[in-house]
Amino acid sequence: MTEITAPKSPVTTAEFADGIREQLKYSQGVTVEQATPADVYVASSLVVRHYLQDAWFKTQQDMVNGNTKAVGYLSAEFLMGKQLRNALLNAGMIDQFDEAVKDLGFEPQDVIDVEHEPGLGNGGLGRLAACFIDSLASLGVPAFGYGIQYKYGIFEQAFDKDGKQIEKPDYWLTNEEPWGHIDYNRSQKVSFGGEVVEENGKKVWKPAWSVRAVPVDYMVPGYASGRVNTLRLWSAKSYDEFDLLTFNKSEYLDAVKPQVKAENISKILYPEDSTPQGKALRLEQQYFFVAASLHDAIRVFYPGQSKPDLTTFPSKITFQLNDTHPVIGIPELMRILIDEYGYDWDTAWSITTKTFNYTCHTLLPEALEVWPAKLISELLPRHMEIINEINEHFLAELKTKTRDKAKIERMRIVTDEENPKVRMAYLATAGGSHVNGVAELHSELLKDVTLRDFSDLYGDKFTNVTNGVTPRRFIRLANPRLSALITEGLGTDKWLSDLELLKGLEPLAKDDEFVKKFAAVKQANKEDFTAYAKREYGFDLDPNTMFNTMVKRLHEYKRQSLKILALIAKYADIKSGRVSADDVLPRTVIFGAKSAPGYYLAKMTIQLINNVARVVNNDPDVKGKLHVFFPWNYNVRLAQHLIPATDLDEQISQAGKEASGTGNMKFALNGALTVGTLDGANVEIRERVGAENFFLFGMTVDEVDKLYEDGYSPAKYYEADPRLKAAIDMVSDGTFSNGDRNTYAPLVADWLTKDWFMTLADFTAYSSIQSEIEALYRDPLEWNRKAVLNVANSGYFSSDRSIQDYLDNIWHTSPLA
Ligand code: Z15
């Protein structure tokens, strides 16, 4: 296999090997002979850190001493994926590592496999944050990622004997974790509760309890940029403040309770994606990391100054609010400025609104966080006062802008009701300079629907930044074969930092020889994945079937139901003899999806998929034709194996529900074709790769709206399409539940009576596009030609381009000189 050249390395193979020996000896305390792959993993990671250290220092110094505004990316989630190979790639040391490890008698792959990925995110939002900090560093923009070092990341998913999801804790920190550098000396105190009193005409917050936020720093090396940024994840530790003299033996356990409470704050990532549960601990987490980060930024940019001029703060750093989760930062910065530094309200507000910008990632109303004012008052009494005051000022400002009283009422940040609520998306829109959606369609819908009143009165704030993904991890690391072919086709590997260069592959789509090489790459990747499925899951795949993948969180709006119903319909076609098995295109359907632990219908859907897989895979009538594979615990690692091996990708959400999607971009860049609706970034992918190279089906946003208005009745669709009826009946009749008719009754009842995301209404269109797909797949050259065109025209979906858009339109800053 051709490995493409990485950026020039600061280190030779011999030096890397010496580094490993030294780390094994002095930090692991083992000889080379005693060392296991786990030891070599830790030692190698420390060697990489060692070689990055000076660039890290220099980036920090240039950031503080220069005039370039930095970026603070505030995010409750960073779904990083494994670190070692990515750091090696970006630092230009892949070959040196591979050779050095072999020289020491180890297999590089064994060393890579040891690493347990930090799962500090749920799905798209967390992974986007990880792609963004990679791009910031690669562009040379000084930046901090700020978040939480959860002790337990996203749960590890398993399936029980009935095919139900079970959740196991993710013990990612139980083994040595060489990447995070804990820095107790730069801790921040974060306080909660208590009351606000007046002293000398000033509001003074007297908190009831405090925790110590300890930073754990991760290096974020840019690809070939010589820059290394910081991901600073806060970990909660207690202050050992209880008085040893005042408690006796029986009070001992009570005395440590506050300590336990403090350390609970960073204990676990909430596993809901797009469906927040209004839990107090979640608000504590949000305030915890945001308060620590804001104080940290002041410490970094005004070192040793007790009376800093914070009117310059917005020229030092701009903070991006990743969804509503960090929005409590707005009243916190107000509090810091007014209470801690003595600024007046107007000055504080002017600084604050210049400092923050807000990215909205959703269109689901239930995903926009709303906190009861009572809860905020209990936890953060001073902040609730400030939020009320922001609300009052804002309402007064609105009165100068419009006479529409109903509109003003609708725009309240704090609702006017018996138990008032705080709408965090509104607070973010009022308290920042810019609001952006994450794909063109999404940003339009934000303006027209979700934040309509705000865009009427503050139209200038609204903008779009279409999401992107890092080509380093998702092409170069995940798909070395395709990377080599791209480099061969373009005659350069510069595309890794300028992805629009992929456009140069377009003429090669006409070159049958090139297309055949592409097909060979895909085939080899499918064979690799087949081996992986066997090794990791004990499952037999046939790499000579079409690999058809749907991976993402399990959510009703994403419509895994549509995929599974279509699959069942195909199975029923064969079973009933309507279709001869000989005419069926052999297909392996691959699912990957975690469900929020408390999401009943999503969990039932997982159970159904597993049981469809069990029945179909064991039925001799469809052998070699239909295969279903549902590997448990879909994560970044599995994505990196699966995406390059996929022929057909599913992006079939109800139009107007998926804000962007980023998996869709990863698949297109790896030469999968997409079957999808006009939703999120699918729209832009299709525009760029060409309508003839994308399988579009289903209702549009307008058609969906109209159908809601006219009154949607799913049962009508069930009656109208006999294949749909046959599929749903098969779920009801016990085929996938050992004859038990009750197992899926709630799911079936939901489909037939509610079907909020209109799966049934899109079923017929989805089935007919599948016939087109199969016809094309039978012509490998034409299929792969289209796949090459997908790769060639998806360069826009690099997160480098997204970051450039943020720099130009929102942050107004630039790379370090
Ligand atoms: C999440 O993963 C996303 C949005 C949210 O509001 C939450 Cl809480 C989690 C996803 C969107 O669903 C997806 O469409 C988008 O591509 C991704 O964020 C990144 O913007």
Image (spheres, grey):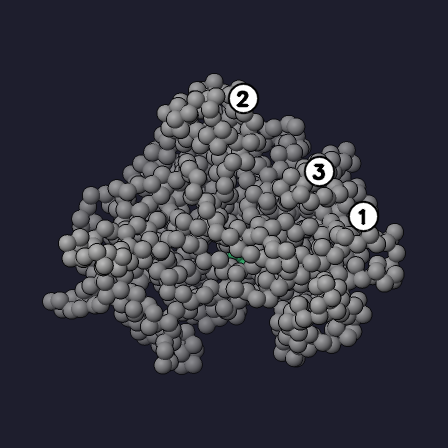
- What residue is rendered at 50% in x and 64% in y? 275
- Dot 2 or dot 3: first in sequence order is 2
Give the structural element (helix, strand or loop) at label 3. helix
Q: Tell me how many marks there are.
A: 3
Looking at the picture, tell me which residue is in the foreground, 11 or 165.
165
Q: Mark 3 — residue?
A: 527
Q: Nearer the viewer, mark 2 or mark 3?
A: 2
Q: Mark 1 — residue?
A: 624
Dot 2 amino acid type:
Gly
User: How many angstroms separate mark 1 from mark 3 (CA)?
Assistant: 16 Å
Q: Position of residue 346 (x, y in %)?
A: 25, 64
Location of residue 343 with respect to 98 vertically, above or below: below
- What residue is rendered at 51% in x and 26% in y? 97
User: How many angstroms separate mark 2 from mark 3 (CA)?
Assistant: 27 Å
Dot 1 amino acid type:
Gly
Q: Mark 2 — residue?
A: 105
